Amino acid sequence: MTETSRTTAIRAAVAAEWAKIWSLRSTVLVLPLTFVLSAVLAYLVGASTANGFTRMSSEMQSRFDPLFITFYGLTLSQLPLVVFGVLVVGGEYTSGTITASLTAVPRRGLFYTGKVLAVLLTALGVSALSVVAAFVAAQAGLGPYRTSFGAAGVPQAVVGAWLYLALICVFAMGVATMLRGSAGPLAILMPLLFLGSQGLGNVPGLKAVTQYLPDQAAAVIMHLTGPPGDPRFGRDLGPWTGMGVLVLWVVLSLGGGYLVLRRRDVR
């Protein structure tokens, strides 16, 4: 196959998956929740922090980081994107339409590439809107304690948050492909991202391991951890090193999903 025909085939596969995604109303409806939750939570956390700022201890005031407030809500608003990534794949296995999909596109590598790219492009778009909404809403809530986009560290944190949301969605998709369904991946990912890693990530005895979990590694660039050297909330990873760890998780997840798709029967 020539390079031109390969590119054409990939474009056709992406277009087919894109059409399939937007034809499933139950799957698409979770996407606006990411935007709404990101904006609403950011404003509420920002406003609550601003109202209580004068009652903080002098130590807490000196360590105040508006970016922590800005992106703290993403720990919850990421969940709809995780659900989306799972349903795009898991829904086909649950409904049995995966057989028809692979009949239409029998080359499984091409099918999988088209699905991954369609999900990634969708997640990048939703993530961009959600992160911008979170930033604007949080600064409105913070009032006199707000920061600006041009302040030191802000552009990096915004880009990191955008990449994180998109990558965690694709990571969830890979997990769903490996487990060939929706219930199993959601039963693992929802507690991991919302309960387990957020709580366990700050336990000193466990932090040496949990800081390498996907969300915890990427939290550094979003300022959702303490400063380096903080015995409880700090992390050993730098911002882009943490993102690199997340990318590694995504690669392993997608690679595992492809191996399962390639080697196992779809039924």
Image (cartoon, rainbow, N blue to C red):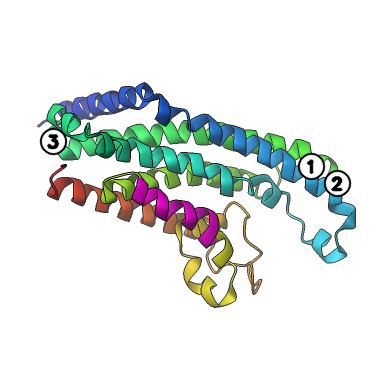
What residue sits 32% from the left and 22% below the top?
Answer: 19
Residue extending farthest bottom: 205
Identify the amino acid type marked 3.
Arg
Identify the amino acid type marked 1.
Ala
What residue sits 36% from the left and 38% below the top?
Answer: 87
Identify the amino acid type marked 2.
Asn
Q: Nearer the viewer, residue 46 or 150?
A: 46
Q: Earlier in the sequence, mark 2 or mark 3?
A: 2
User: In this rendering, does residue 53 appear at all?
Assistant: yes
Q: Nearer the viewer, residue 42 or 167?
A: 42
Q: Which residues are magenta?
A: 183-197
Q: Secondary structure at mark 3?
A: loop
40 up-or-down from 192: above or below:
above
What residue sits 49% from the left and 67% below the top?
Answer: 210
Q: Position of residue 261 (x, y in %)?
A: 19, 45
Q: Earlier in the sequence, mark 1 or mark 3?
A: 1
Q: Secondary structure at mark 2?
A: helix
**Residue at mark 1 to residue at mark 3: CA–CA distance:** 52 Å
Identify the image quadrant of residue 118: top left
Check residue 107 in the rendering and tell me which mark sits there, or answer none.
3
